[in-house]
Image: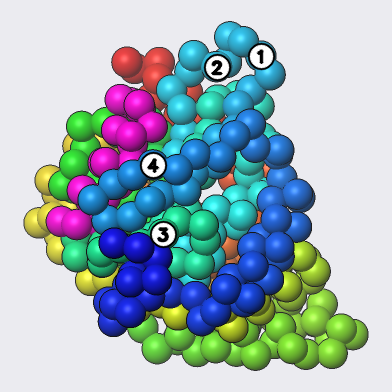
Amino acid sequence: MTETAARARADVGRYVSDAWRDRYFAACDAVYGLGAPALEELDVETSFATTHVYRYGPADPAARSRTPVVLVHGAGSCSAMWYPNTPDLSAERPVYAIDTPGCPGRSVQREPIHQPERAARWLDETLAGLGLDRVHLVGSSYGGWLVLNHVHREPGRVASATLLDPGGLEKVGLRFFVWIFVSLFATWAPKALRPRLASWLEQPVLIVPELRTMVSAAVRAYRIRRPAPLPLSDDELATIRTPLYLVLGRRSLLVHPRRQVERVPRLVPAARAEIIADTGHGPQIDHAEETNRRMLDFMASVDRLG
């Protein structure tokens, strides 16, 4: 299916125009410029999309043989959102950052992937197309649901899963959608007000000019065509045997942190769960250095166990 034909599908995400797509890509490139430089960009053909991937790597030859990290971003964004994390992560391991089909990015979607079985198949085909047999998966928000769903359904290639304030644990409540709406509205606030609003909303988008421009362009440029994913049940979580690291912001509006810090390790034997203070939905942005170190320490501990 051509990109033009894909645009006509009611269940496939699309750009409103080529001009807005190009404007959004330019904004994304400015955000990528804040992080580590990519070694290369790859297009992986799957049954559902041409999936665009950015590859980063360590300068140290010894680190290049370590189990790679695969990053799966949140909804309404692209892999540029990982700019605070790619320098530290790629200094110690190979890193692949995926543009998820159905979200604004450089992947070209042909078929929907919001159904759990399709989402797992798409991600497995992407990993296979990259030639990766063993990876540390990291997902944020909606990307957290994709990762959680994957280790429930297709765990074969996954050494560990790190979930950063993820979807997939609770039904998304009204308070989260209100926060998203108010945060988007605040991107158009006068410059002098943005630092105060950023602190109140715990929304770094408002004070990083490149990130603010990218988010604003995404809203105008792209139309998401998928329902919100359903959370995994207790029985589904209990099937997971992959080492799991759950990182939640104390003031998260997506989940109830204390509830999930108790629930997930109780259901998943190989799970570790922690809460980071002074943050909400974006610990990997608000506390990038601390979160990067915690993730790398967790991955190293998994690798030591074989």
Q: Are marks 4 and 1 in contact (CB under 8 Å)?
A: no
Q: Amino acid at mark 3?
A: Val
Question: Which secondary structure, mark 1?
Answer: loop
- In the structure shown, which secondary structural element does the residue marked by tag 2 occupy? helix
Q: Is residue 259 above or below residue 7?
A: above
Q: Please name which of the two marks, 3 or 1, marks the residue nearer to the observer.
A: 3
Q: CA distance from mark 4 to mark 2?
A: 21 Å
Q: Earlier in the sequence, mark 2 or mark 3?
A: 2
Q: Residues within 10 Å of mark 4 (few under 14, many from 20)?
A: some
Instruction: Please name the amino acid that badge 2 sits on.
Output: Arg
The residue that label 1 is drawn on is 60
- Could you tell me residue 74's position as x and y percent? 47, 62
Q: How is the image coloured?
A: rainbow
Cα–Cα span, label 3 and label 4: 10 Å
Which residues, given as a range, are shown in magenta? 117-134
Determine the main secondary structure of the stretch shown in magenta.
helix
Vertical comparison of 195 with 166: above or below: below
Image coords of residue 30 (percent x, y):
75, 57
Q: Helix or strand or loop: what does disc 4 sit on?
A: strand
Q: Identity of the amino acid at label 4?
A: Val
Q: Is residue 191 left or right of residue 255?
A: right
The label on residue 44 is: 4
Q: Residue at x 33, y 34 (%)?
A: 129
Residue type at tag 1: Asp
Q: CA distance from mark 2 to mark 3?
A: 29 Å
Q: Is residue 123 magenta?
A: yes
Q: Nearer the viewer, mark 4 or mark 1?
A: 4
User: Would you say residue 235 sits in the magenta stretch?
Assistant: no
Mark 2–mark 1 distance (CA, rounded to whole Å): 7 Å
Query: Which residue is disc 2 drawn over?
Result: 64
**Measuring 33% from the left and 44% from the top, which residue is drawn there?**
45
